[in-house]
Each structure stands twice: as structure tokens, then as C-alpha cells.
Amino acid sequence: MNAEQSVYQVTAGVSALRRTPTDDGAMETQMLAGELFELIEEQAGWARGRALLDNYEGWADMATLSAPALIPTHAVKTLRTYVYAEPDMKSAPVCLISMNAKIVGARREGRFVEAQRMGWVLEDHLRAVGEPVESDWVAVAERFEHTPYLWGGKESLGLDCSGLIQTAMEAAGRYPPRDSGPQESWAKQHGRAIEITEGFSGLQRGDLVFWPGHVGVMTDAETLLHANGHHMLTVKENLARAAKRIAFNYAPISGIYRLG
């Protein structure tokens, strides 16, 4: 196998990256349509390798991958959209693809763009790769409010705390690591620490708030947005109340950072 053949592309709506090569293996993260995956080995229909977006390693179902990898032309700009079997909204839906999923566009027919090896996608729900990205990543994150919490998820049907941050930032052209621990290290490098006061004064929209194993973002001086296992949803709540609950049940805040 040469180097080009070892790089595959997700051609399903989403591909789970699992800890073990089994359908019920713990999901570590997800790869969205169009993302690239470097194959290390195959085993009974499963591929061990790493997601090239963030170097996350695990096992992916080979049925969700295709080779060779093609250069994406469009990315999904809405929370989610359908891929259809035909360029017709009345045709059978093939799958859902979420924000930041990428397609390799081919023909156009009416309002639809053909996504190679997948189906047809409404052009209004896409942006060309290279077009200006979202200017306010926090506003992108707010669009995920009420999305169910899903460990390892980073799609619009379910995501976890760090998946929310990574997904929203990617839509704005920033690429933090996948997990909250590395994200905190990344925030230290790309921003500055904010003093943690007793009343959490001096905070502003866009400040990242970290706990050991958890992260959220401030939408204003008092309100935290985070995907969390307590509500099993992505919610907005008062930071002081959330911090008190999390400290009681788990751990206090480890750091607050304002990005540059």
C-alpha cells in the first residue's frame, strides 16, 4: 500500500472513531463527511488509524470510508442538511450531514450540488471551501443550544463539551485540539488567563472556562454555554450556579482564558 492509498475519506454522514474494532466499542470521537483518515491497519472490516483533522486515533468502520481521498469543494454551513439520492427534495434521503462536513462537488442540477460518492445536497446549505468563515464562533456555538449531549460526539445530532468548542471554532476558521485538556493548553498558548474571582467578575463573551475534563464558553458576563452530562444537553446557565454544582460533584474551575 502506498502513501496515497493509506489516506481514506469519510463518505458517510458521520464515522465513529472507536476504542475497539467493534460496533459497540466506546466512541472516542467522530469524523464528519469529507474528513480524512490515515489507515494504519485493517482488521475484519475495521480500520485502525488517525483522523487527520486533529490526529485522534481509533478504529473506524471501513464501510464509512472511501479511497482515494478527493479535494473537498464545499462545506456545510447550516446545523445539518440531508444528502438526497436524487437532485429532488422528494427523493429518498441518504443521510444527514452536519456543520463542517465537506463534500466533493460535481454536477449541479437545479438547486442541488452532486456530492461525489454520496448523493445530492441543497446548494443553499453549503459554502465553497475558501469562502469567508463565520465571524463569531460563539454565535455558532449558540446554534447548538438544546443539542443532546453525546460522549465523543461532534455533530449536530449530539456532541460533548469539547466537541462543541472544536466544531464552533472550526466554522470560524480556528482549529483547537479535540479534548478539553489539550484545549486548555491550547487556550493558554493562544490567549491569556483571566483571574478567577469569588463572584466571577470581569468575564466577557468568548471566555473559555475549564474544569478537569470539561469546558464551556461564556456568552455574556454571567452565562455559560456548555454541553454537559448533568443536563444531557447543550445548555446556557448561570456560571456561578454551574460552577458551584460542578465543584460539589466533581472539581472546581481549573482556568478561564480569553483568546487573542
Image (tube, rainbow, N blue to C red):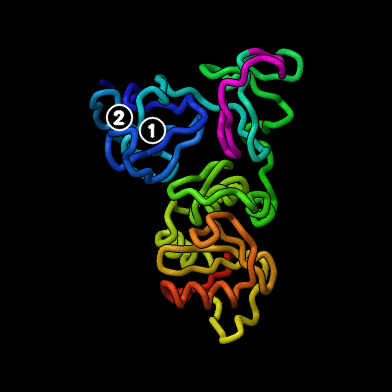
* Residue at x-position 59% and y-position 76%: 241
Numbered label attached to residue 47: 2
Numbered label attached to residue 205: none
Percent from the top left, x then y, of residue 64? Answer: 42, 25
* Residue at x-position 44% and y-position 27%: 9
Let me know if residue 204 is in the magenta part. Answer: no
Instruction: Using the image, determine if residue 18 lies above or below residue 234.
Output: above
Percent from the top left, x then y, of residue 39? Answer: 31, 30
Instruction: Tell me the amino acid under the disc marked 2.
Output: Ala
Instruction: Using the image, determine if residue 212 lies above or below residue 109.
Output: below
Magenta segment, which residues?
86-103
Q: Answer whether labels 1 and 2 touch (C-beta < 8 Å).
A: yes
Q: Nearer the viewer, mark 1 or mark 2?
A: 2
For disc 1, the marked residue is 37
Choose between 180 and 195: the one closer to the eye: 180
* Residue at x-position 32% and y-position 40%: 25
Disc 2 crowd rating (10 Å Cα; few below 14, some 14-19, many 20+) is many
- From this viewpoint, which residue is outermost toward the bottom? 198
Instruction: Using the image, determine if residue 90 lies above or below residue 232.
Output: above
- From this viewpoint, which residue is outermost toward the right? 110
SS of the residue under disc 1? strand
Instruction: Tell me the amino acid under the disc marked 1.
Output: Phe
- Left or right, residue 138 beside residue 33: right
The answer to which image quadrant residue 2 occupies is top left
- Left or right, residue 26 beside residue 132: left
The answer to which image quadrant residue 101 occupies is top right
Instruction: Using the image, determine if residue 226 lies above or below residue 109.
Output: below
- Left or right, residue 237 beside residue 32: right
* Residue at x-position 40% and y-position 38%: 52
SS of the residue under disc 2? strand
Q: Quadrant of the N terminus?
A: top left
Percent from the top left, x then y, of residue 200? Answer: 60, 81
